[in-house]
Image: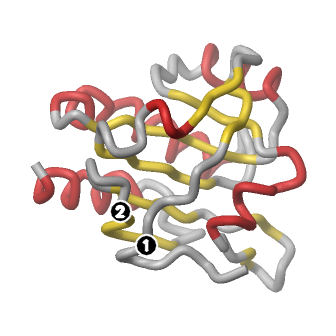
Amino acid sequence: MKAVAIGDKAPVFQLNNQYGERYDIESVLGKKKLVIYFYPKDETLGCTAEACSFRDAYSKFAALNCEIIGISSDDEESHRKFAIKHRLGFILLSDPGNRVRKRFGVPTSFFGLLPGRVTYVIDENGIVQSIFNSQLFATKHISEALKLVEKLS
């Protein structure tokens, strides 16, 4: 399966959110701008910093008609606890088996030992406008995404 590239239509998928509810990406795809970020694991140092940075910038994204969605292979209960503990006001989706991660073509890092950290910015037409891939600079995902979402507005 080919990795999602800039200019591609975003893949359609359904996953459960942190409350165990089925979330269908088609409910927002083509209606709002989207920032979909894949991250390795709840409660790890980099992932917590990234999630909290998205939380802190959430109102800026929302004002630009943009939804933030975080995806990892952690289960719904882990996501729920993570979201409550860090007061995350956006959607976390559980991707057991990494089906959606593979569909996007998110690479692994550190010689395949760690799930990749990649952020996709998708415009209101459902087209991927940006892909930011950086395992080490977790909080840079937020500034890069916000810059592009502002340009798209």
Q: Nearer the viewer, residue 26 or 45?
A: 26
Label 1 sits on residue: 8
Horizontal relation, residue 59 to residue 67: left or right:
left
Residue at image location 71% in from the left, 45% down from the top: 44
Horizontal relation, residue 2 to residue 70: left or right:
right
Tag 1, which secondary structure? Answer: loop
Horizontal relation, residue 18 to residue 119: left or right:
right
Tell me, what colour scheme is on the image?
secondary structure
Name the quadrant containing residue 127: bottom left
Report if the CB atoms under discs 1 and 2 are less than 8 Å apart. Answer: yes
Label 2 sits on residue: 127
Residue at image location 72% in from the left, 77% down from the top: 109
Residue at image location 50% in from the left, 47% down from the top: 50
Tag 2, which secondary structure? Answer: loop
Total number of numbered labels? 2
Name the quadrant containing residue 122: bottom left
Q: Position of residue 2 (x, y in %)?
A: 65, 82
Examine the rendered structure and indicate whether residue 36 appears above or below residue 114.
above
Horizontal relation, residue 34 to residue 41: left or right:
left
Give the label on residue 87, or none: none
